[in-house]
Amino acid sequence: MTAPLWTARVVTVFPAMFPGPLGESLAGRALERGTWSLEVLDLRDFADDPHRMVDDTPFGGGAGMVIRPDVVDRALQTARPAKGRMIYLSPRGRRLDQALVRDLAECPVVVLLCGRYEGVDQRVLDANAVEEVSLGDYVLSGGEPAALCLMDAVVRLLPGVTGNRDSLVEESFADGLLEYPHFTRPAAWTAHDGVERRVPDVLLSGHHAKVAEWRRSEAERLTRERRPDLWASRERSIKTLTEMRQTPNGN
Ligand SMILES: C[S@@+](CC[C@H](N)C(=O)[O-])C[C@H]1O[C@@H](n2cnc3c(N)ncnc32)[C@H](O)[C@@H]1O
């Protein structure tokens, strides 16, 4: 068997949560074929007491428990890749987006540290220069669902995982835009509200250039309406690129 294209090394107190949903469908088949590999380290195996304790009370008081630095450090020294990145899933981190997903897909090994309780002692994150990545501005009860989402997003980009590579080129965020709407048969459909809804004529026209133009303009409209932040950042990138092209020496 050839070496996997991508390896996720997960550090968790709940190893039974993996591969979970990633054992099914495209990711599951790719895992079976060895396109990617999943290594799960049980944080409790790195504890040094008979009760396999990984947490302790927070200095300064307050609610909850904190995961101990010595235990995490031993796990990270075992998980540390020769070439790769170490990530702590955390609501304080850089927000996961498609650009970061693409970067991570290029990285042969990614270590994913899943927090629990109040989180992980800061010193072990600093000592290992761990990157923090967030799934979004809300609080999960643990890093495991975030690690599963991150892995799902990366794995589907690996060669051979997603059947039709074109769908990766056209989908949301690929070009800084949300995706255009999709339709399938029947061409005219009456829903429970009694209103007949028809597929836009252009999609039935068989005119490829017009279809592409319509999809592009719908993608732009949806992005402007729903994600003004994404639209503004795309406009800024286009402006910068245009300016760079106009000054070939970068002066
Ligand atoms: C209950 S949370 C801790 C929340 C932390 N006390 C705070 O207020 O930021 C436990 C763990 O879930 C994970 N987690 C929670 N929300 C997350 C998010 N939005 N993205 C990624 N991981 C998250 C982190 O690993 C975190 O250590």
Image (cartoon, rainbow, N blue to C red):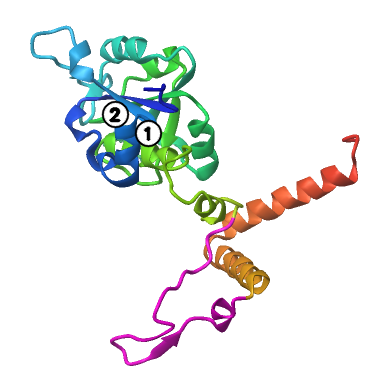
Residue 141 lies, in percent from the top left, at: 24, 39
State ligand 1's quadrant.
top left
Vertical placement of residue 42 versus 137, above or below: above
For the point 59% across and 76% down, the residue is: 206
Question: Magenta span covers which residues?
Answer: 177-206
Vertical placement of residue 27 versus 52, above or below: below
For the point 85% across and 45% down, the residue is: 245
Q: Residue furthest top?
A: 48
- State yes or no: Cβ of the residue under disc 2 lies below 8 Å from any atom of ligand 1: yes
Vertical placement of residue 51 versus 135, above or below: above
Q: Which residue is mark 2?
A: 115
Upstream in sequence: badge 1 or badge 2:
1
Tell me the quadrant of the picture where the C terminus can be found: top right
- Give the number of callouts: 2
Q: Is residue 99 visible?
A: yes
* Quadrant position of residue 18: top left
Q: Residue furthest left?
A: 50
For the point 37% across and 33% down, the residue is: 90
- State yes or no: Cβ of the residue under disc 1 lies below 8 Å from any atom of ligand 1: yes
Considering the numbered disc 1 on the image, is that residue within a helix, a strand or a loop? strand
Q: Is residue 54 visible?
A: no
Q: Which residue is mark 1?
A: 90
Viewer-proximal residue among 7 and 184: 184
Residue 230 lies, in percent from the top left, at: 58, 54
Residue 131 lies, in percent from the top left, at: 46, 26
Say whether residue 217 is magenta: no
Labels 1 and 2 touching (C-beta < 8 A): yes
Q: Magenta segment, principal secondary structure?
A: loop
Q: Amino acid at mark 1?
A: Ser
